[in-house]
Image (spheres, rainbow, N blue to C red):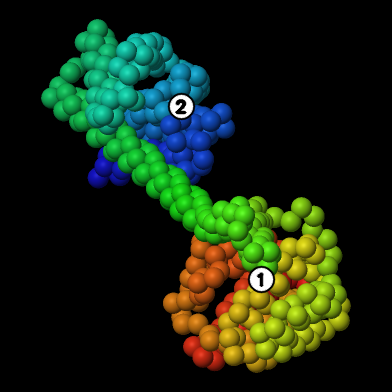
Amino acid sequence: MNIFDDLLLNILVLTIPIVLTHIVWLDRPGTLDSYDKYGKVVITIICSLAAIFCMTHPFFKSIGDHFDLHIIPVLIAFLYSGIRSGLFVSGVILAYAYIMNGPSFFWIVTLLAILVPFILAFIALSNWKHITPKVMFPTLLAFVSALATFCITLLYRVGSFIQVDHTFLFYGLLYCLVHLLTMWLLTNLISRIRDNVKTRQEIQRSEKLNVLSELAASVAHEIRNPMTVARGFMQILSQSQVPEEKKQVYTAMVIEEIDRAQSIITDYLSFAKPEAEKLEQLDISSLSPMLSNLLDPYAAARGVDLQIHMENSLFIQGNLDKMMQCLVNLTKNGIEAMPTGGPLRIIAFKKGAQIILKIMDTGVGMTAEQINRLGTPFYSTTNKSTGLSMMVSYRIIRTFGGDIEVASQPDQGTCFTISLPAV
């Protein structure tokens, strides 16, 4: 049982660190096909330590020769980290063999002198990384390397007139099979890890491209509508028989449609790059008169009573223009959600380490499904809106380190709660 315990311990020490290194390192951007400089250093150190452990704990000791798995770390270093890494691990094995067992040092040198050129020739000639069965070739290489080691040991025994019995031959065959199965396990795990990482990165890349294409198509569609309307009115204006009063009406409509297209482009650019150029200490309560002056006429025209109540000294780390853009977007949405008018309240207060802003309308409200879709590209509860303003508002608040929560019931109004870290 001690043999199997030592063997399983060797396989565990070989497998766990090498597999974990692949999982952690290859999942980083740009390191899928090969390790970067630091990754090669890590895999070299891990393989060196694994080789030292295998040499310290051989699993076949009862037959006079110590058989261990130190060839596996050498192969892993050569195959997955490069020639320098493999040579370094080989040097570590030689140094440790000399320190640990001086008389057998000559045979370790002989084994490595035969195996290393063979491994290098295999790597140079096989082009194994570009062949579909990436597991078979390293596995066969491990088997052949173990077989070569066993044959050299056998020749040494015959030349030294040491008895070669059935037990020695059985353990030698088992030694080769252990190398084959261990290398198959390692390379199979590494291959699957690489394939999974590659698949996941391809999925992420395709999702990004899909979102980008949908966003571009939506922006083009939203801009085409006002441009088509403006073009139609310009064609009418080009006709000489159009009365003067009609020209003024059509001109106003053309300007309105162009402003609408400009607003869509501005919202898109804000969504694409929402980060404020300069973050500074900002008192939200100072925005109350600006917000009132800007939105009172818009609210009054729709029969909405805009009520703003903010505590004093509500300081956050933010940007004045971006914060105003966010509040205007959310307040306008609230006003437009109240077709029959009514009160719309904006309150702000400090709660612990948070500044809380609530925008509460008494409009048509939203269902749970509509709330979940808020802030997604080009989703709006009204036919006139592009949905970009809501996306921009969400992005701005998150840029400031805050969050937006929405509570709503159909025909009972909506409450937007903005939480921002206080300064």
Q: Residue at x 57, y 32 (%)?
A: 38
- Choose between 333 and 375: the one closer to the eye: 333
356 above or below 72?
Answer: below
* Residue 153, quarter of picture: top left
Q: Is residue 383 left or right of residue 150?
A: right
Query: Which dot, 1 or 2, sits closer to the camera?
Result: 1
Q: x and y percent of residue 331 in the render?
A: 67, 77
| Tag 2: amino acid | Ser
Total numbered circles: 2
Tell me if residue 106 can be seen: yes
Where is residue 28? Give x, y as percent.
51, 42
Residue 243, x across and y down, in percent: 64, 64
Residue drawn where x is 76% and y is 53% of the image = 277
Q: Residue furthest top?
A: 159
Q: Which residue type does callout 1 highlight?
A: Asn
In the rendered image, is residue 146 in sight?
no
Q: Is residue 203 above or below residue 366?
A: above
Residue at 84% over, 65% down: 281
Q: Around disc 2, counting alpha carbons within 10 Å, would you say few (fewer than 14), some (14 to 19), or many (20 or more)? A: many
**Mark found first going from the N terminus, 1 or 2:** 2
Q: Nearer the viewer, residue 384 or 291?
A: 384
* Mark drawn on residue 21: none
Q: Which residue is mark 1?
A: 329
Q: Residues within 10 Å of mark 1 (few under 14, many from 20)?
A: some
Dot 2 lies on which element? helix
Task: State how far apart marks 1 and 2 are (Cα).
Answer: 54 Å
Q: Mark number for residue 81?
A: 2
- Judge from the rendering whether residue 210 lies leftward or rightward of residue 160; answer left or right: right
Looking at the image, do the residues carrying marks 1 and 2 touch, with CB atoms under 8 Å apart?
no
Q: Which residue lies at the image location 32% right of the left edge and 24% below the top edge?
A: 130
